[in-house]
Amino acid sequence: MARETNEVEDASVLDAQIVEDYEYIVPQSSQLTNPFPMPSCQGITLEEATIDQIQDYMTQGVLTSQDLVQCYMERYFQLNPYLNSVLQVNPDVFDIASDMDAERANGTVRSPLHGIPFLVKDNYGTKDKLNTCAGSPMLLGSIVPRDAFVVSKLREAGAVLFGHASLSEWADMRSNDYSEGYSPLGGQSRNPYNLTINGGGSSTGSAGSVAANMIMFALGTETDGSIIDPAGRQGVVGLKPTVGLTSRDMVIPESHNQDTTGPHARTVRDATYILQYMYGVDENDDKTAEQIGKVPEDGDYVKFVSDKSALKGAKFGLPWDRIWSQAKEDEIERLYEVLDMLTEAGAELINNTDWKNPAASISVDGWDWAYGDTRGFTNESEFTVVKADFYNDIKKYLAQLNNTNIRSLEDIVEYNYANDGTEGGNPGTLPAFASGQDSFLASLEWKGVYNETYYQALDYIHRTTREEGIDYALNYTDPSTGENFQLDGLIVPTSVSVTYQQAAMAGYPVINIPIGIREDTARPFGLSIMQTAYGEPQLIKYGSAIEDLVKGRETPKFYDYLSKVVPVL
Ligand SMILES: *[C@@H]1O[C@H](CO)[C@@H](O)[C@H](O)[C@H]1NC(C)=O
Ligand SMILES: *[C@@H]1O[C@H](CO)[C@@H](O)[C@H](O)[C@H]1NC(C)=O
Ligand SMILES: *[C@@H]1O[C@H](CO)[C@@H](O)[C@H](O)[C@H]1NC(C)=O
Ligand SMILES: *[C@@H]1O[C@H](CO)[C@@H](O)[C@H](O)[C@H]1NC(C)=O
Ligand SMILES: *[C@@H]1O[C@H](CO)[C@@H](O)[C@H](O)[C@H]1NC(C)=O
Ligand SMILES: *[C@@H]1O[C@H](CO)[C@@H](O)[C@H](O)[C@H]1NC(C)=O
Ligand SMILES: *[C@@H]1O[C@H](CO)[C@@H](O)[C@H](O)[C@H]1NC(C)=O
């Protein structure tokens, strides 16, 4: 719209003109009100509703699963043109909801998830009318033999699969320089707090759909940060389980050493319900056998959900060297404020609980899974492990599909070259994939060889992040009394990306709790708790306690909602 303000001399006329124009000009960053208020659902406030609340409504008979699906469908049509958080809607979703309603009417409530709609990232195999593609058109029409194990468990618990969430294509395995949340199939998945900026990834749409109240919960996957990073940047709870607690069967893989499946939710209690019905031993994923004897004896994680009173007497470590010392300027004031709140609530914070040798695994230049290579040691690099694993793991996954010619990394790379204009096979073709498919090429070059270099790297990343890293920091000896004890967790700023990278290499669990909104970009940020293998009970207990104390989640305001900029930074 052209505004001829230069011809207006009377200042009051100018004011009037501007005011009038503002009815037509989209108020961008300066917008004061939420442009996408969420309508009520059958007179019930669905926005920010918890699983417990929804179950109560369904028990009372004032809301059905079909109502929920209808309301989320309307939300999808309201928001998805802007956010692209949802990649595909399940055409059977109303039928599934109707079945769950009939069961409930007949007296069967399978679990707290009965009738609750959810999304899974597009790399979860679902044996239905949906495509499982990790965002890549090359897998359209391929047929999976079965649901991913965790998806089948959630279906058994009565949860209603609404569709697939958007993601960074191939869960970020393909490129070093890319736009987070972009896939050729799903387009750019956007951060609902500020659509011009990076929503984190690779489970971008999983976190974003939950943040924008487009769904009750979503599943993400993580190899290195892909659940925790988008949870932090989009203001939701992300729970990344220990590698081995939740099955990866029929999930498009990166590395069997590091891949996990886990939830995004708006509260820790909701995330815990989901974990409760996801975890378990799966004969198709050997790694899950390791959980035997390490999960709660009664199998119940939900009992660990707590409130701020649990903080009294809790002892947390603050790893300072290369972690807190890298906290972001725009977050530090609030982070310190939260630390003060923790102390006032009765927790003891112990500073300088560091890794034995922080420089061995923690980069000072941000997230870098080739940090070993950067230091000149391929035999000490996380990327050596991931790139070798990917080559073999993707081949095994693809071998299980029907109706596809894509059988190997060679085929994947070839497809991207052959369709350069949409797939960005070459550097510089697409703004979303500035470096083309360089990570794929690195994996292709290594060809999945498991030799001494690989095993040295695997041992190295485990040792430096486990016994000399997270476990070392958790095992605290008071220098003045000599008393030795295990800390209840390590508290770290989520935005310091090297934190979740440590947990990724170790295969250890992390939880993100939203604590505030940054002033520079209006995006959320969080605080994470780190623990040792199978430390989920502590993460749930203290995560819910901190959530109750801080109440740091805010709903998005959709700043710059017309932005279609790519790449997002
Ligand atoms: C209702 O419950 C009865 C008895 O358990 C069962 O036989 C019937 O199939 C159920 N109907 C539905 C719609 O679930
Ligand atoms: C693939 O096709 C074969 C032959 O028809 C069949 O036996 C097998 O079950 C199919 N697998 C999947 C994943 O559909
Ligand atoms: C922790 O110790 C470092 C020095 O190692 C210091 O700079 C920092 O301010 C301390 N943080 C807190 C919260 O006490
Ligand atoms: C292991 O294999 C990789 C890829 O072929 C190669 O670069 C590396 O030098 C090998 N390491 C050893 C010790 O042979
Ligand atoms: C990696 O190789 C270097 C020699 O190039 C050696 O000094 C170092 O100990 C090796 N690292 C591991 C973890 O074996
Ligand atoms: C904790 O550290 C102490 C003292 O350094 C050591 O003796 C003990 O074995 C460690 N415990 C664990 C569980 O690593
Ligand atoms: C949104 O992010 C952009 C940077 O991409 C920033 O310039 C703008 O101020 C942000 N909007 C708000 C409301 O903070």
Image (spheres, rainbow, N blue to C red):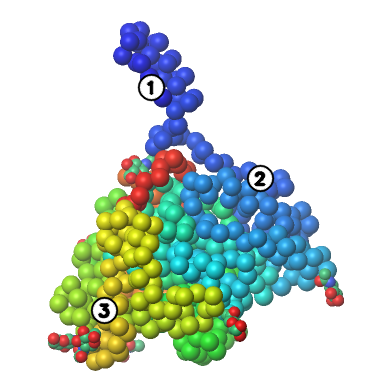
Write down which quadrant ligand 6 falls in.
bottom left
Distance of label 1 from label 3 (alpha carbons): 55 Å
Whether residues under marks 3 and 2 lie with C-beta atoms below 8 angstroms apart, the answer is no
Q: Residues within 10 Å of mark 3 (few under 14, many from 20)?
A: few
Say which amino acid is labelled 1.
Answer: Ala
Mark 1: few/some/many CA within 10 Å (<14, 14-19, 20+): few
Q: Residue at x 68, y 70 (%)?
A: 158
Q: Secondary structure beneath disc 1?
A: loop
Spot occupied by residue 317 in the image (x, y as percentages of width and height) = 33, 71
Q: Tell me the mark number nearer the camera, choosing from 2 and 1.
A: 1
- For the residue marked with disc 2, what is the amino acid? Ser
Occupied quadrant, residue 152? bottom right
Q: Label 2, on which residue?
A: 40
Task: Confirm whether residue 248 shows in the render.
Answer: yes
* 3D distance between C-alphas at marks 3 and 2: 54 Å
Q: Which residue is labeled 3 in the image?
A: 445
Percent x, y of residue 456:
24, 88
Q: Residue at x 32, y 55 (%)?
A: 430
Q: Which mark's residue is nearer the viewer, 1 or 3?
A: 3
Q: Which of the two discs, 1 and 3, labels the residue nearer the N terminus? A: 1
Instruction: Indicate the amino acid at tag 3.
Output: Glu
Q: Residue at x 26, y 91 (%)?
A: 451
Front one among 489 and 55: 55
Rounded to the nearest whole Å, what is the CA distance between mark 2 and mark 1?
A: 38 Å
Residue 128 horizontal side relative to residue 3, left or right:
right
Instruction: Point out the frontmost of discs 3 and 2.
Output: 3
- Residue 52 position by quadrant: bottom right
Q: Which mark is residue 2?
A: 1
Contact? badges 1 and 3 (CB < 8 Å): no
- Residue 179 percent coordinates (x, y): 34, 56
Establish whether ligand 4 lies closer than 8 Å to the Cβ of label 3.
Answer: yes
Q: For residue 93, which numbered disc appears in the image?
A: none
